[in-house]
Amino acid sequence: MKKLTIVQKKKIKLLKNQIIENNSHVSKYKNYLILVKYLNSILKLKKKEYKKNIFLDYKIDNSKISGKDTIIFSASPALICYSSMKKYCELYKNKKCYALKNEIQYNTSILFKDRQRKQFNKLKAWQLARYFIKIKKLQRKHVIKYLRLNESGEIQKKHMQKINKISEILKKHDIRVYTYTHNKEIEKKDITSQNLIINSSHKNIKLSNKFLSYNKNTVKRINRIKKDKKIINCLADCSKCKACKIENNLTILCKIH
């Protein structure tokens, strides 16, 4: 990858800050498109080569999330997360969102997730599901058990029918679908597939479970006074815990990292 000049780095930083700090939905998205175009022009990455006829960008190598049993696919970058656009998420505004931190630091991460964004919007539910099933079949050393949607970005109300359809197709292939949302527009009734788990990261929204992020002092305080067995701590290692992948009306406390 081409080494960037100081001028290029400054321009990239300026564009990212304009996206994050801009309050206008339209201006935020416009600056995002400018950033993606600029990154493509200066980074000059080799054209993505897709293997085994799987024309999809995905990961299965995030040890923190799963070890090797989870396909990871995002519908959008964190920079244009829907909940940030609608001002639902304070972590984005304060630059404490872990996915946003990743994109602030790594330019290639933005381009990777932008390709995923285009793929999610272009492909139909059955086409995406077919790719996920094929990915599972190609894994020989590890058994794929889960699809993690949106390592970054956010689900929208208009996406729910598509996500439910994907979940129903994958149910027949023993792949459970789970994700997280801070979107106040998502309701319990929007989850029509029993194979879909949505963890709410908003304290006032009840979905499959709650997954709430606090600073470490707040987590310690809650742990001192908590009496409800339904309140547990995130282990920060999903290979050792399945709490987010099963509907159990839990409240899972996560330290902001």
Image (cartoon, helix red, strand yellow):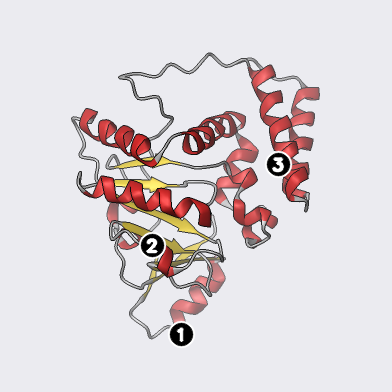
Circle 3: is it few (<14), some (14-19), or many (20+) Cα within 10 Å?
some
Asked which secondary structure carries label 3, the reply is helix
Q: In whole angstroms, how far apart are the C-alphas of marks 2 and 3? A: 28 Å
Q: In whole angstroms, how far apart are the C-alphas of marks 1 and 3? A: 43 Å
First-in-chain label (2 vs 3):
3
Q: Is residue 71 above or below residue 230?
A: above
Q: Nearer the viewer, residue 12 or 159?
A: 159
State whether residue 94 appears in this view.
no
Residue to which mark 3 is pinned: 29
Q: Indicate left or right for 40 with 59 as reference.
A: right
Residue type, label 3: Tyr
Q: Position of residue 139 (x, y in %)?
A: 23, 31
Residue to which mark 2 is pinned: 191
Q: Position of residue 129 (x, y in %)?
A: 32, 39
Residue type, label 1: Ile
Instruction: Please tell me in which quadrant of the rendered image residue 5 appears.
Output: top right
Between disc 1 and disc 3, the foreground one is 3
Between disc 2 and disc 1, the foreground one is 2
Residue to which mark 1 is pinned: 225
Q: Which residue occupies 20% across, 39% down? A: 143
